Image (cartoon, rainbow, N blue to C red):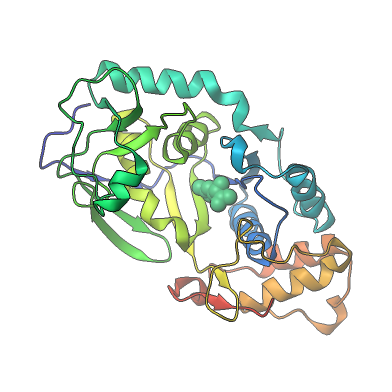
């Protein structure tokens, strides 16, 4: 499908398919409280909808990977009784799928190569608003970008409501494969979500700006759009998002029940005293029963936690 200049794409249709959710951590470090919260919310939402909850390790960026992170993440999820359905998957096994998607986009003439150095885009303040520099150069190597023109993307976020973005303004033509041949997150995530039949993407609000790009790619590839729900992220006292890369304190699996309790408090679901310190399976079962996509999730402002 080609998108003319003023095309408008509306994403997030009600899928009508049985719910399939997922948690998709990058192995850039062990889980911290914020990523545990993300895992818990996406699991509760899936289970509440009698859905499946898949686990995918997004290991598409080996230079950023931290040795042992995948094992630590799996161990933490298991220790907190956040148990996924089906086989654990790794994006490193999806290369053929990514290449096929690129080929489909190339054949429909949506792609071009770009040899702009990151530094020069930064200097020209166009890292997040690509000015189309290489769009008509017909280069045969470099980073692969998707043309976007003035593409308006609208979608309904389950918690953040109506969203609208003009991809032409920001970020402009965007990268789906880097010049070092690594696949970009924007492409990898939608190809793998599609391949595993994900109907519901539930993740932190820090990723909401990526969603229009992902909806655009889904439209170009003729994929069904999932529903999206972005919830507030956890920050430290200074207001910075907890993040694996910036070395937020890893959760201690030995305190698993207490960690779950902290996350549930943030969700407005304080544990009954009889459940304090109970095995995680009991806490998670209780949480599934009592979870409502509650009003706290509608907040755009982050939850602040002490680290
Ligand atoms: N891999 C991403 C991360 O760890 C999450 C991607 C997603 O949920 O779409 O932040």
Residue 183 x, y percent position in the rendering: 47, 31
Q: Quadrant of the C terminus?
A: bottom right
Question: Left or right of 254: which side holds 214?
Answer: left
* Quarter of the figure with residue 20: top right
Residue drawn at point x = 58 percent, y = 53 percent: 49
Q: Is residue 50 above or below residue 133?
A: below
Residue 142 x, y percent position in the rendering: 35, 26
Q: Quadrant of the N terminus?
A: top left
Report how many numbered discs are placed on residues in the image: 0
Q: Nearer the viewer, residue 100 or 241?
A: 241
Q: Is residue 123 above or below residue 142?
A: below
Residue drawn at point x = 61 percent, y = 74 percent: 267
Q: Nearer the viewer, residue 249 or 35?
A: 249
Question: Left or right of 286: which side holds 7?
Answer: left
Residue 50 x, y percent position in the rendering: 62, 50
Q: Is residue 144 visible?
A: yes
Question: Left or right of 76: which side holds 136?
Answer: left
Q: Is residue 128 visible?
A: no
Q: Nearer the viewer, residue 8 or 108?
A: 108
Residue drawn at point x = 50 percent, y = 69 percent: 232
Residue 45 x, y percent position in the rendering: 59, 58
Residue drawn at point x = 42 percent, y = 40 percent: 186
């Amino acid at each position: 499908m080609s998108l003319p200049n003023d095309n408008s794409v509306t994403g997030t249709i009600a899928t009508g398919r049985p719910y399939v959710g997922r948690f998709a951590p990058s192995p850039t470090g062990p889980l911290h409280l914020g990523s545990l919260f993300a895992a818990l919310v996406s699991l509760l939402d899936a289970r509440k909808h009698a859905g499946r909850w898949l686990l995918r390790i997004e290991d598409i960026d080996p230079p950023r990977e931290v040795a042992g992170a995948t094992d630590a993440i799996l161990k933490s999820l298991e220790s907190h009784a956040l148990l996924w359905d089906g086989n654990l998957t790794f994006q490193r096994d999806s290369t053929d799928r990514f290449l096929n998607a690129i080929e489909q986009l190339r054949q429909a003439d949506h792609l071009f190569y770009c040899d702009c150095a990151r530094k020069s885009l930064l200097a020209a303040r166009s890292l997040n608003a690509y000015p189309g520099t290489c769009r008509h150069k017909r280069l045969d190597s470099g980073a692969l970008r998707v043309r976007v023109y003035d593409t308006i993307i609208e979608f309904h976020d389950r918690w953040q409501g109506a969203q609208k973005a003009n991809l032409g303004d920001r970020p402009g033509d965007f990268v789906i494969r880097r010049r070092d041949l690594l696949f970009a997150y924007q492409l990898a995530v939608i190809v793998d979500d599609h391949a595993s039949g994900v109907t519901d993407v539930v993740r932190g609000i820090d990723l909401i700006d990526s969603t229009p790009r992902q909806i655009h790619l889904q439209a170009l590839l003729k994929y069904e759009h999932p529903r999206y729900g972005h919830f507030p992220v956890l920050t430290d006292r200074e207001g910075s998002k907890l993040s694996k890369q910036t070395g937020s304190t890893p959760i201690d699996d030995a305190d698993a029940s207490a960690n779950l309790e902290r996350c549930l408090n943030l969700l407005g679901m304080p544990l009954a005293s009889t459940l304090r310190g109970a095995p995680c399976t009991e806490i998670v079962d209780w949480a599934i029963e009592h979870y409502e996509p509650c009003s706290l999730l509608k907040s755009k402002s982050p939850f602040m936690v002490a680290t």
